[in-house]
Image (tube, rainbow, N blue to C red):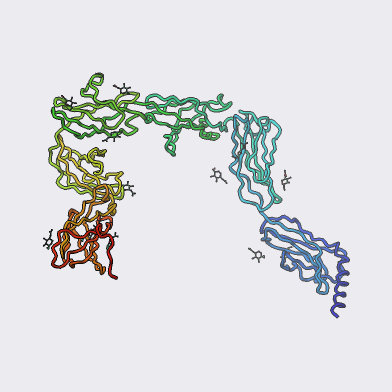
Amino acid sequence: MKKKQGLLWMLLNLIVVEGVHSCRITVASSVIQFGSPLSASCDCPHLRSSKSVVVWKLDKDFVPCNQTSDVQMSTCPLYFPNFNKTTGVLQCYLRRNDVLQLVDQTNIKAGYPPSPATNISCLMFISQNIVNCTWQLQRDSLLEENVTLSAFRSKDECETPSSAEYICNPPKGIHFCIIQRKYFNNFDDLAVRVTVQNKIGSAPSSLLCLKPLFEVKVDPIIIDDAVPHNDCVRLQWTYGKKANFLTAMRCQLHYKMATEIEWTKPIEIPVDVKTADQCGLLAATKYDFQVRCIRKFLTGQWSEWGPTRSMITAELAPAEKLESWWRTLESTQNGSLKIQLMWKKLEKNKANADHVWYIVKSSSDLHETNNILCNTTNLNCTIVLHEAMKSVFIWTYNNAGVSPVKEMTFPARIGTPVSKMLVSSNNDTSLQVMWDPPSSAEGYLLEWYKCTELPDCEMNWKTEQKGSMSSILQDIEPFQRYSVRLYPLYQDCIGMARETDAYSKEGAPDYSPEIRLLTVSKSQAVVQWDPIPVQKSNGFITNYTVFWTDTSGKENSSTVNGSTATYNITDLIPSTTYQVFLMSSTSGGSVNGTALMLHTANLGLKVGSGLLSQILPTVKWES
Ligand SMILES: *[C@@H]1O[C@H](CO)[C@@H](O)[C@H](O)[C@H]1NC(C)=O
Ligand SMILES: *[C@@H]1O[C@H](CO)[C@@H](O)[C@H](O)[C@H]1NC(C)=O
Ligand SMILES: *[C@@H]1O[C@H](CO)[C@@H](O)[C@H](O)[C@H]1NC(C)=O
Ligand SMILES: *[C@@H]1O[C@H](CO)[C@@H](O)[C@H](O)[C@H]1NC(C)=O
Ligand SMILES: *[C@@H]1O[C@H](CO)[C@@H](O)[C@H](O)[C@H]1NC(C)=O
Ligand SMILES: *[C@@H]1O[C@H](CO)[C@@H](O)[C@H](O)[C@H]1NC(C)=O
Ligand SMILES: *[C@@H]1O[C@H](CO)[C@@H](O)[C@H](O)[C@H]1NC(C)=O
Ligand SMILES: *[C@@H]1O[C@H](CO)[C@@H](O)[C@H](O)[C@H]1NC(C)=O
Ligand SMILES: *[C@@H]1O[C@H](CO)[C@@H](O)[C@H](O)[C@H]1NC(C)=O
Ligand SMILES: *[C@@H]1O[C@H](CO)[C@@H](O)[C@H](O)[C@H]1NC(C)=O
Ligand SMILES: *[C@@H]1O[C@H](CO)[C@@H](O)[C@H](O)[C@H]1NC(C)=O
Ligand SMILES: *[C@@H]1O[C@H](CO)[C@@H](O)[C@H](O)[C@H]1NC(C)=O
């Protein structure tokens, strides 16, 4: 049964297929403006009399004809008052006896009219001898567009062409055209227009009229010469390849220290000047310079900043007196003093050179050569100060000259000390010093050094301003004991030092001392130990704890303060073996020492010295 029906359907279909080749969809345009009306009809001239009905589909959906009266075979006109798809497939079917037969289809595209190009600008590149015109496109029309640039020369402000038109059709996505030299003259007007076209319309831009030479972008400016003098540099440049005939150009300069990232703000150079003197630079410092130029009336475009030209400024004589300090190393029998002078390295912007050296003399005459005490690049020097010498004089030299002289006197350190001083850890690598400032102090001087290096320690020092009440000492090593001294500086003398030891960070001592047995009796034992040296203590020893454990494992302990080095253990059980050891503590931690065995005397026996573990190495413990 089913097979027979299928055959019948096929036959019917064949009949339908007979005349459908004549069916055609007619639309006014297959490309229309988005939202505009669309009319279509489907005409089958050879099937006019048949009983078929035309049915429409737009993409997947059936759409009704705009005509209901003539249900019989007709063109079934279709009408969309505002077609709102960007693309659609319109299909025409014939229906006969409930069978649908596709007879024709067409693609519809909807979009917008083109928008004119904007921001049309042309730049002339002198070294390449071309004019490069660029533009921007506005709204996407959703349709295929083509862009045409047309240009012609003119002698009357682009009113009439004086040469054939140059036409350029860049490929899709390219928004510039290159106009070759044969299509323009440097001083003649050049008319440029960009037209955007699609299937719906054409949008010409307004006409751009320009003189190529006024729209110049010169090559990046190369600085030909950079010569340092004093605190200045003299720069010289050209406008680039083939561009030296240009006039009415203005340029800008910017610079930076070679070690910096940010350039200065652009510095204006007078019109048509191709040199600049930039002053106010630091001495003996590497600087980077760049120049860019544009036409005086700011037409065209700034050139790119040119390649960096670097140069090192000249050295100048050091600008400042040294900051200095001194300490007495020893006094000799004949009344002279061995003194170490110390001074601070000048900042680069005061030293005005990479290399400086220092000369100390006993006279203030710069040119006298027979009384030189030191000639050094170090930041210290040791002199012998005779009784007759009240002061010495120091100069800083570099290759360019000599600094103002610094006179050093050596007043006694007998003034009032600060009344209170506190040194504490600031963090693991720095210390904080705080003090009560005496009202008459003109400033302060702090000295600090590692106690473990005494007496030949390297001394650090710094000054603090009048009125200061605290200071941070940097580059402190943790677990190292430092001595910090504070001197108030007065008008005519130096105050006595106040001194404190401190750690930036404390830790457990390297080891705990071994215990020695001094005496042992029936119920007492006196033990003793050697204090931990500063190099090994890693902090201030706050206390020692003596532990003693008998054979049953009962542990006792007693804590004594860190300055003690002996302990009397009492209430021991006679004739018993004890294990004794010492714990050493700082605020940063504790460490236990090795154990000593001791044996208390028998009841009734008088014992002078106990049995040491060294004598009786094996001790049997009761379990
Ligand atoms: C049929 O189309 C015409 C334009 O061809 C239009 O004016 C009319 O309103 C349409 N009628 C219907 C029912 O859509
Ligand atoms: C597009 O048009 C159809 C029919 O005119 C309407 O039903 C639909 O809402 C419209 N869609 C939009 C996004 O306007
Ligand atoms: C035109 O150029 C200017 C400056 O370059 C820019 O701000 C603007 O957005 C551009 N206009 C268009 C339509 O791209
Ligand atoms: C022209 O200018 C455009 C936009 O700045 C640029 O991408 C293109 O490389 C230039 N062409 C030439 C030959 O300089
Ligand atoms: C640009 O497109 C328009 C409209 O589609 C067409 O008339 C014209 O010939 C096209 N021009 C070029 C150069 O392809
Ligand atoms: C004093 O003694 C030191 C060495 O102890 C010596 O260098 C110095 O020249 C002596 N000074 C005088 C004035 O004799
Ligand atoms: C200091 O020492 C340097 C290097 O040894 C030497 O060239 C210079 O002449 C010395 N200066 C004086 C004033 O003696
Ligand atoms: C310690 O403190 C000093 C001074 O405040 C600071 O410069 C340094 O970076 C600090 N160090 C650490 C590890 O925080
Ligand atoms: C003196 O200077 C030398 C060289 O800079 C340095 O090694 C030494 O530690 C300094 N001496 C003191 C005590 O500061
Ligand atoms: C240890 O302490 C006991 C009891 O207090 C005392 O009799 C004895 O003299 C002390 N020994 C020493 C050496 O101090
Ligand atoms: C011993 O010193 C440590 C570290 O400073 C501390 O924590 C502890 O309380 C002290 N013990 C006694 C008994 O003082
Ligand atoms: C030292 O030994 C005592 C007693 O056994 C113990 O309580 C303490 O934790 C030990 N300390 C260290 C730092 O090991």
Position of residue 377 measured from the top left corner of the image (x, y, whole percent) = 31, 29
Q: Is residue 566 left or right of residue 76?
A: left
| Foreground residue among 6 and 329 | 329
Ligand 1 - quadrant of the structure image: bottom right
Would residue 34 appear left or right of 527 to someone viewing this image?
right
Q: Residue at x 67, y 55 (%)?
A: 111
* Residue 342 coordinates in the image, percent (x, y): 25, 33
Q: Residue at x 71, y 33 (%)?
A: 164
Q: Is residue 35 left or right of residue 594?
A: right
Quadrant assignment for the N terminus: bottom right
- Quarter of the image for the C terminus: give it: bottom left
138 over 266 or under it: above or below: below
**Towards the viewer: 532 or 482:** 532
Tell me if residue 221 comes above or below residue 516 in the rendering: above
Residue 304 pos. (x, y %): 53, 35
Q: Quadrant of residue 65?
A: bottom right
The total of numbered circles placed on residues is 0
Regarding residue 590, the answer to whether it shows in the image is no
Residue 550 found in image quarter: bottom left
Which quarter of the figure has residue 313? Answer: top left
In the rendered image, the vertical position of residue 172 relative to residue 456, given as above or below: below
Judge whether residue 55 can be spotted in this image: yes
In the foreground, 137 or 343:
343
Image x and y of residue 243, in percent: 57, 26
